[in-house]
Image (cartoon, rainbow, N blue to C red):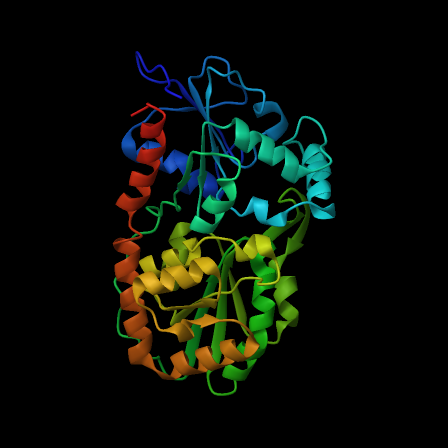
Amino acid sequence: MNVDIRGGPRIGYVPLHPMMTPPGDRRRFPAYAADRGIPFQVVDGWEGMDLVVLSSEADIVFWRHAPAGVGIVLDLPDAFLEEGWGLRSAARGLAKWIAGPLSRPVTSHHRAMCRLIERADAVVCSTPEQERNLARYSDNVHVALDLHREFKPVSPVDATLRGDRLHLVWEGLYPTLVAIEPVLPAIRGLAEDFEVVLHLVTDPVAHRFMNRYGTINVADVVERWGVKVEVHPWTPVELGRVATFADLAIVPVDRSDPYTLGKPENRMRIFWRLGLPVVGSESPAHRRACEVAGMPADVLCVDSKDWARSLVHYANEPEERLAVARAGHTAALGVYGDESVLAAWDGVLQGLGVL
């Protein structure tokens, strides 16, 4: 479709959170619009709008019925379609109605999402794998990774350890913390030769369910891990500060969950941007990113044995840590740089006649 832009398009955005605090509200369409100087307003309906960009927290039941004259861009950065049909999809449809994003319960969140994808004039995702899945329901799918301008690039520096202390760093939200647990045996083994400190940059107090209900202290969760852990509050500044003394970043993924296994390489890109070497779980996105950056295969791990081998190897090889940090940093500012992300969103709006 072409949006009537006489006098400028009236663009709305349905955020992940009213305060625009989640990473997706800071790093995706709103960040792009701010960089390009494109005005938009936060909305909960289509009245008066030419185009509305929907986050994954939009009411998928309500927005499927948006009038034909209103352009809809659906931003789906996670692998929602990987869940498929089943009890989990049914539970998600009920839970999202109880929590508020849905105006009525749906027996299959997957089916309802597919219907909205079919209604959307453009769909934005994060990986080529997601693009192929979404193409079954839409003929206008674009791939755009997160914009990371909130992190100032830092060039990799001498990777020699300070004494026998090894600083590992992980960042993320509480629901993804579970992915670290299969890596713990490798970290404990590493602690036999080094004074290992695992730095977690996350929300110290998090919600247990749906990012809304119940609270849990992360320090209580990690107390039983059997490794030295320091929890840092998640802010871009704090992550950047921790990165200045970290030796190695880890990006584990729960490989048993198709939803998390289908996530993009955004965390790798953040750490590469901050000048750190990364060891991560093997996944389609991580494998592709490492190939693009020219990384050795041993930075990706399938199981606990791989993690043990890789962590021991890179802990003992400062020159190789520095080499992979430099390769990642080059990729983060080059092929994965800001302009490539901005250009992807340009393509979305140009295809709709907005730019």
**On screen, residue 319 above or below 293:** below
Position of the N terminus by quadrant: top left
Q: Is residue 127 visible?
A: no
* Position of residue 208 in the picture relative to residue 254 (left or right): right
> Can you tell which quarter of the image residue 260 is in?
bottom right
Q: Residue at x 45, y 78 (%)?
A: 311
Q: Residue at x 37, y 60 (%)?
A: 289
Which residue is rendered at x = 45% and y = 82% of the image? 312
Report x, y in % for residue 68: 49, 16
Q: Return the x and y of residue 95 as percentages of the image width and height.
A: 71, 39
What is the count of numbered marks? 0
| Placement of the C terminus among the 4 image quadrants | top left
Residue 325 placement, left or right of 143: left
Residue 278 visible from this viewpoint:
yes
Q: Is residue 275 above or below residue 68?
A: below
Depth check: 163 or 6 in front? Answer: 6
- Residue 167, how many percent across, how many down? 43, 73
Residue situated in front as seen by the camera: 269 or 295: 295
Residue 344 in which image quadrant: top left
Identify whether 167 is placed above or below 346.
below
Judging depth in this view, the residue of 138 and 7 nearest the camera is 138
User: Which residue is at 65% across, 44% downward?
Assistant: 210
Residue 71 rendering spot, x and y as whole percentages: 44, 22
